Image (tube, helix red, strand yellow):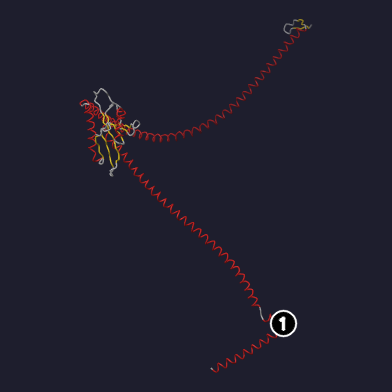
């Protein structure tokens, strides 16, 4: 047990060890907390001081950076101002150019619009005229058909085509004729046959024509294709190259109203036309025939040239064979002559070699003969030396006596 006195009131009380330990623990905890609090305050104060110093340093650096940045901004602002001024000047120049180009384009566009409007007006007027003309033509044919019977309409269409052809025949087709087909031996006949000839009276082109029309009141309406088979039959029987159906049937057909209609997919070399295309189809087919005739003539010329070239090649080959044969004979004779010459040359070479060897021997003999003297022959031979000396003295006496005789002869003369 421990006796404890209160420091405030002075009262004493007793504590056991557990109580004492508990109070001691409380005292220690209080001191520890006080010390901790003091240290935390010191640390907080040191932290604040460091933060103030750091803030001052950062503020100083920031101010410096701000000053440098302001200087850079001022410099850049100056450059930007100069660049803006330069850009404004360049932009003003560009704008002036663009405005000028815009004005030019606007002026050109205005002119083109005017031209377009004029063209549209012209085309519209032309189109209206064509429509009006077609309407008038349709109205004319309708009125025309209403006034005539079916037979008269067909006859009038034939007369129309015959008149159209005869009006230009002399100028456009001087070597041609356009006549009715009156030959019905085969059981049928066409309406007209056109034939044209070259200046050499050769047939250039032939066309079988059939003219068809029908009155509006006719109960049975015919179509153009209803006459194709019979027209093709007439063309073949009369030996014509082309077949043309001049027709007013199917007046509302866009196909047959467009111009010259080729129906060769049904029957070869067959066409369908309205009356206004009667002369154009003849001209079209005739020009094609003229071009074909021209190509035929050129082809014939080429063939003739090819024949000439073939004959020339045959003649050339014949001469080549003759020359080759003679060349072979001449070559054989030449080679034989060369062989004989080679043999002769070989023999001459041998003779030459022998003669050269003989000449060498003669030359050596001559050299030895020239080197041969009396002195050499009598050397070391006293007998021969004495004999030659005597002979020499005798020749001298003989020469002296001959000299005396000559002198006497000259004196006596």
User: Whole-percent x and y of residue 244?
Assistant: 29, 33
Q: Position of residue 267 (x, y in %)?
A: 33, 32
The answer to which quarter of the image holds residue 391 is: bottom right
Residue 149 occupies quadrant: top left
Q: Give the total number of marks visible in the rendering.
A: 1
Q: Which residue is mark 1?
A: 381
Q: Which quarter of the picture shows residue 187?
A: top left
Out of 115 and 123, give the one closest to the viewer: 123
Farthest residue toward the right?
Answer: 1
Q: Residue 51's x, y, as percent? A: 62, 23
At x 59% / y 92%, what residue is drawn?
405
Compared across the picture, whether 379 is left or right of 264 comes to right
Residue 412 vs residue 90, the one in the foreground: 412
Of residues 187 and 197, which is closer to you in this image? 187
On the rendered image, what quadrant is the N terminus found in?
A: top right
Residue in the image at 23% along x and 32% along y: 158
Please tell me which residue is depicted at 65% across the width and 88% down the height of the picture: 394
């Amino acid at each position: 047990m421990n006796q404890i006195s209160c420091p405030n009131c002075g009262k004493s009380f007793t504590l056991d060890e557990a109580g004492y330990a508990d109070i001691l623990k409380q005292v220690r905890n209080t001191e520890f907390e006080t010390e901790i609090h003091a240290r935390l305050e010191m640390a907080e104060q040191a932290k604040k001081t460091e933060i103030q110093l750091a803030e001052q340093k950062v503020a100083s650096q920031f101010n410096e950076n701000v000053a440098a940045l302001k200087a850079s901004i001022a410099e850049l602002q100056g450059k930007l101002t100069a660049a803006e001024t330069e850009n404004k000047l360049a932009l003003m120049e560009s704008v002036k150019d663009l405005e000028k180009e815009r004005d030019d384009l606007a002026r050109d566009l205005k002119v083109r619009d005017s031209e377009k409007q004029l063209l549209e007006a012209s085309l519209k007027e032309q189109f209206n005229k064509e429509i009006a003309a077609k309407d008038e033509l349709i109205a004319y044919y309708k009125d025309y058909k209403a006034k005539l019977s079916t037979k008269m309409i067909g006859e009038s269409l034939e007369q129309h085509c015959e008149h159209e052809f005869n009006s230009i025949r002399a100028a456009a087709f001087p070597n041609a004729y356009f006549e009715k087909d009156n030959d019905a031996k085969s059981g049928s006949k066409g309406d007209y046959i056109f034939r044209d000839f070259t200046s050499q009276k050769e047939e250039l082109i032939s066309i079988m024509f059939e003219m068809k029309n029908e009155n509006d009141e006719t109960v049975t309406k015919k179509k153009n294709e209803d006459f194709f088979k019979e027209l093709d039959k007439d063309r073949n029987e009369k030996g014509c190259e082309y077949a043309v159906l001049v027709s007013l049937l199917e007046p509302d057909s866009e196909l047959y109203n467009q111009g010259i209609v080729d129906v060769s997919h049904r029957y070869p070399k067959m066409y369908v036309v309205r009356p206004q295309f009667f002369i154009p189809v003849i001209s079209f087919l005739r020009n094609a025939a003229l071009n074909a005739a021209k190509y035929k003539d050129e082809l014939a010329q080429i063939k003739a040239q090819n024949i000439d070239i073939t004959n020339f090649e045959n003649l050339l080959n014949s001469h080549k064979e003759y020359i080759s044969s003679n060349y072979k004979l001449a070559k054989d004779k030449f080679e034989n002559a060369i062989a004989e010459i080679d043999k002769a040359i070989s023999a001459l070479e041998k003779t030459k070699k022998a003669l050269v060897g003989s000449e060498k021997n003669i030359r050596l003999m001559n050299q030895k003969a020239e080197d041969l003297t009396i002195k050499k022959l009598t050397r070391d031979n006293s007998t021969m030396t004495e004999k030659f000396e005597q002979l020499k003295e005798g020749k001298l006496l003989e020469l002296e006596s001959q000299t005396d005789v000559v002198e006497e002869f000259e004196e006596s003369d």
